[in-house]
Image (cartoon, rainbow, N blue to C red):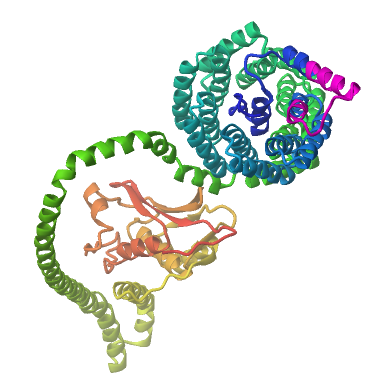
Amino acid sequence: MLSEKNFIPHCKSSLAKLVLCVFTLCLSIPMLAQTSKRDSLAFKFQRLESTNRFNPKDTSHINLLARLAFSYRYLDTDSLFSIGEKVLKYSKDIDYAYGEIKGLDALGNYYYSKGNREKSMPLFKEALELAQEIESIECEVSLINTLAQNYSFEGNYAEALNWNLKGIDLAREAGNQQMLSILNENIAGLYADQKDFKNALMFYDTVQKINRRLGNEVIDAETYSNMASLYKDAKDYKSAMFNINRSINTFEKNKIYDWLAYAYQVKGDIYLNQKKYKWALYWFDQSNMLFKHQIEDDRIKIELMNGMAKVYFGLEKDSLSLKYAEEGLTLSKKIKSLQGQIDCSETLYKVHKKNGNNPDALAYLETFKTLSDSLFMDKNKQSLSLLETKLHYEQEKQELIEANEAALAKQRNYIYFSIIILFILSIILFVIRRSENIQKKLNKKLKDKSEAVIQREAQLHEINKTNTKLFSIIGHDLRGPIGGLQGILKMFTDGDISTKELISFIPKLKTDVENISFTLNNLLSWGLNQLNGVVTKPKRVSLSYLVGNNIRLLSEIAKSKSIKIINQLPENPRIWADNNQIDIVIRNLLSNAIKFTPENGLITIEAKEKSDMWQVSVRDTGIGMTAEMQRSIFKDSSNITTYGTNNEKGTGLGLSLCKEMVHKNNGEIWVESVPRKGTTFYFTVPRAQNRYQKAS
């Protein structure tokens, strides 16, 4: 019989929750009274057997035997099993369905207490089918409640919720307020297990309303103890302590020792969560004394053992912590409690880790992670969310049906008139919608064509800009140096200058050729970018190699101005980028620094690691820039060409190209400068990782 309030949803272990709540067979009856009741039932049965008056075909005798079986449920499970088998056999012999239900229920509870749900669930379902056949709502609701607890215990919260909803329908139909309280409290527990405290408290509000109608202070106290556990998990310790003290007073007053043991344990957990270990140990000891002397059920011990292990761990008594945690883990494995194994494995991991037992610590950590993943699957939480509103609908269904029937009765006289109006409106709406759809299609075509024209116009405008700039650069920045080179060569071939004079021009010619080459490289790279012809191909690249190579390439230009270049990169930094593009960036920044640094200046190149990026900086002691120049130099539309300290001239493409290249490699570029003191250009580039990501 499970009609009593037997589901305590907010123990941290769902195993402990189910056991503690199923354990209370009779509300307001102390455990000593339960023992007396069991002894009384056993005496009656023994007297029937000793006087040969026990009749296995007498349903009243079978019922007595069934009650005796359930009196052993949490005290002697072997007796529960052996007597339950007799009840089932005797009932089948005389085709007594109610007795079969009780026998199947007893055997199911035996396997359930052993953690063998593969055997318990079919027995409970068979008993439920019999209860439905004989239309025993009392048995049906109790068995539905039991099945809901089984599904909750194995972590299938969506199925547990469905069974609780079915039970609520039946309990409401039968007018059973006590079962309505229990089933609503079960659902509150499911939400609490999902850490959805808002919905859990909403259902507890429903439970408390039902409890007020029942007017039983013990039932109220049971709810308070469950709510205390919820507030504890929500870290609202003030509310948790208020509720648990309220429940303890009632249980002590009425001598409800099973619930009192649970309340003591919750109070111990509240102190444990606040790291008040001595007080936690005190209340765990109080609870343990009650469990030790009154209850024979391995499942009930798991949460208590792990709690005591945590307390001793906090008190730095690691040997005792290890002892209790191992005992809890052994019990959890024995009855196949996943939650118990998770909690105890976590505690054992912490103890072994603290004591430097790394292999054992790692083993328990792996156990903890594996079992956690298997128990807390996302699909259960998602299923529970999908069913979240169903209960509200079911609870208000009867009221809504009555209200709808009244409304329909009032409106029946207007039905035909409404149909005619609706028909006319439908025709009008159809015509309007048809016209709107035609208009929408025409508007869409017009809009598409307009957008195509605008897009094409923009493309042509960009192409014209690109062409204009290309011809400007070719006409002014390349033709001048090449013309000078041609002039010198013509003078030599015409005999206007001697070989010795030509040799004197070689340094200048070399510089001009290098400038032309540098300008052409920038020009080609920029032109390809503008025409979307450059594909970024990132790979693992040595930043040191790129920087060193460019320093060597530009060393003669720097030497001609007596500029010293210092490489302060850390040892062999690796980046994930396009080799050629970052090479162009470094070369342009170094060339600019040389160009705008006066003689005897200093250029410093550094790189710092920033999270998953390298931040590269090129610092010079040059002429610096104004704030206005700093704002405009990276703009795509910028055509600024500035002469260097020795009248060096560029294309104005360098920094625009640098910006494009850095962005293509998922980086950023910026500048900091003070006029007449120097300039520092910064850019970031991804750090090479074990797993590479593609640049945009």
Q: Name the foreground residue: 529 vs 677.
A: 529
Place of residue 474 in the rendered image (x, y in percent of width and height, measured from the top left): 24, 78
Place of residue 26 in the rendered image (x, y in percent of width and height, measured from the top left): 65, 19
Residue 560, visible in the rendered structure = no
Image quarter (top left, top right, bottom left or bottom right) of the N terminus? top right
Residue, x 60% and y 8% (percent of image)? 249
**Residue 47 falls in which quadrant of the image?**
top right
Question: In the rendered view, would you say 239 is above or below 549?
Answer: above
Which residue ends up furthest to the top in the rendered image?
Answer: 253
Image quarter (top left, top right, bottom left or bottom right) of the C terminus? bottom left
Q: Name the foreground residue: 204 vs 132.
A: 132
How many marks the image carries: the answer is: 0
| Residue 462 in the figure: left or right of residue 515 | left
Q: Name the foreground residue: 33 vs 195.
A: 33
| Residue 105 in the figure: left or right of residue 416 | right
Place of residue 394 in the rendered image (x, y in percent of width and height, measured from the top left): 42, 38
**Residue 56 falls in which quadrant of the image?**
top right
Instruction: Assess whether residue 565 is covered by the magenta stretch.
Output: no
| Residue 415 in the figure: left or right of residue 135 | left
| Residue 441 in the figure: left or right of residue 495 | left
Which residue ends up furthest to the bottom in the rendered image?
Answer: 494
Question: In the rendered view, would you say 152 is above or below 205?
Answer: below
**Residue 124 falls in which quadrant of the image?**
top right
Q: Name the foreground residue: 627 vs 610.
A: 610
Which stretch did the figure color magenta? Answer: 39-65
Question: In the rendered view, would you say 171 is above or below 576?
Answer: above
Residue 501, visible in the rendered structure = yes
Residue, x 16% and y 49% (percent of image)? 415
Residue, x 25% and y 59% (percent of image)? 635
Instruction: Assess whether residue 56 is covered by the magenta stretch.
Output: yes
Chief SS of the magenta region? helix
Place of residue 270 in the rendered image (x, y in percent of width and height, measured from the top left): 61, 19
